[in-house]
Amino acid sequence: MNFDRPKILREKVAEPKAKIFANILINLFTDRANRIYVSKLRTEHNLSERTIRGYFKELREIITDESMKLGSRMDLIKAKDETRGEYWYLGTASTESDENGNIKTNNQAIDSLNKLLVFYMTERFFERFKAENLKNEADIIYKSLLDSLKYKSDIKDLLDNIDKIFYFFRFAPKECNSKILQTVIDGIINKKVLRLEYFGLGYKKPIQVLVKPLSVIYFEGLLYLLGSGVKRGYRAIRTFAVDRIKKAGYTGKKFHYNYDNFNPEDHINKYIGVMTAEHKTRFELIFKNDTVLKRLVGERKWFENQSFEELEDGRLRMKFSTYLTHEVKRWILSFGNDVKIIKPQGFI
């Protein structure tokens, strides 16, 4: 007699597939021979052999597809141990073929260089399944890869000094509350409606606002939240400086949002800032006849629809349309007496 739980009950209490896949990959990476036994999975996750075979088939397709994109020949191979039974391991496909023309696969564990490719591939895998809370596992994998590169000092030195080779400089940074940022990111990932206490730049006191958080933008050392209002008539996308959010909490409600119709670029002031206004304003500026100044201004993309014209006296005329925000004002006024503002009138 079969006393197994009904299928619907098993599905309700079963672990998420992404978590089981992550566990399989971590075992494959950290095991000295890059192998994992079926009996181990059956015991730890209470899975049937049929389910395990299905998981490995799916994983194998992902690994071979992604590794081919990266110019490698990795494979997930099934084998059997006389004492511990069936297991799977990561191997690399050789360029040799058997008598039937099929590519042979070697029985050695993949080397450190291939592991780096697999690590990259695994991050892609986590993205595909939208697996959350896997940072610790990813750190374990990455550390094991670095440790395995002790005899390849050139590669290890490169990875150890990557932050010096590609140095990132923050412009006038302003710190934000880490707990608030964590709440914001959790709200985006898990689609939770947030209650914010927000103290805007021009506000006299903080206001309470309900927000559907959609995206976080990094610009000039600061973080900004793009979010949609909840109440009818207030559902337009708004921009919130994360460092000006004084409190952030959950409402207990979730939301659905169609990201197919959402693009952060549509809700920021491209190139020059992130803040927007209801309407765009036409600008006309004239910069003085100075070679360095004209190159500084004319060689960069400040606004999407900008145009330049050199006047007969050598001065440079610039025209564009954009939102009239404090970011745009700050940019124009930064040129001081080197620029004359023709439009809009009454700018200052």
Image: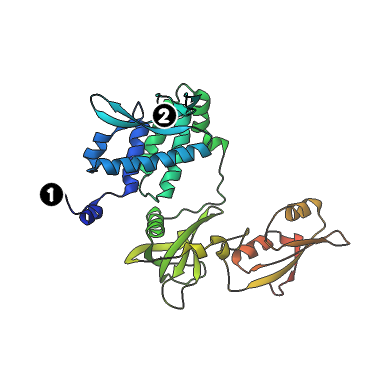
Residue 120 in sight: no
Residue 168, quarter of the rendered image: top right
**Separation of marks 1 and 2 at Cα, in angstroms:** 39 Å
219, 5: nearer the viewer? 5
Residue highlighted by disc 1: 3
Q: Is residue 190 left or right of residue 300?
A: left
Local crowd size for mark 2, using a 10 Å CA cut-off: few (<14), some (14–19), many (≥20): many
330, 17: nearer the viewer? 17
Residue highlighted by disc 2: 91
90, 280: nearer the viewer? 90
Q: Position of residue 277 (x, y in %)?
A: 58, 71
Look at the numbered disc 1 and give the secondary structure of its residue: loop
- Image mark for residue 253: none
* The C terminus - image quarter: bottom right
Q: Position of residue 179 (x, y in %)?
A: 37, 55
Residue 345, quarter of the rendered image: bottom right
Residue 265 in sight: yes
* Badge 1 or badge 2: first in the primary sequence: 1
Q: Position of residue 310 (x, y in %)?
A: 83, 60
Q: Position of residue 80 (x, y in %)?
A: 29, 27
Vertical relation: 230 (above or below) 111: below
Query: Which residue shows up at 78% across the image and 61% down it?
Result: 308
Vertical relation: 263 (above or below) 221: below
Amino acid identity at mark 1: Phe
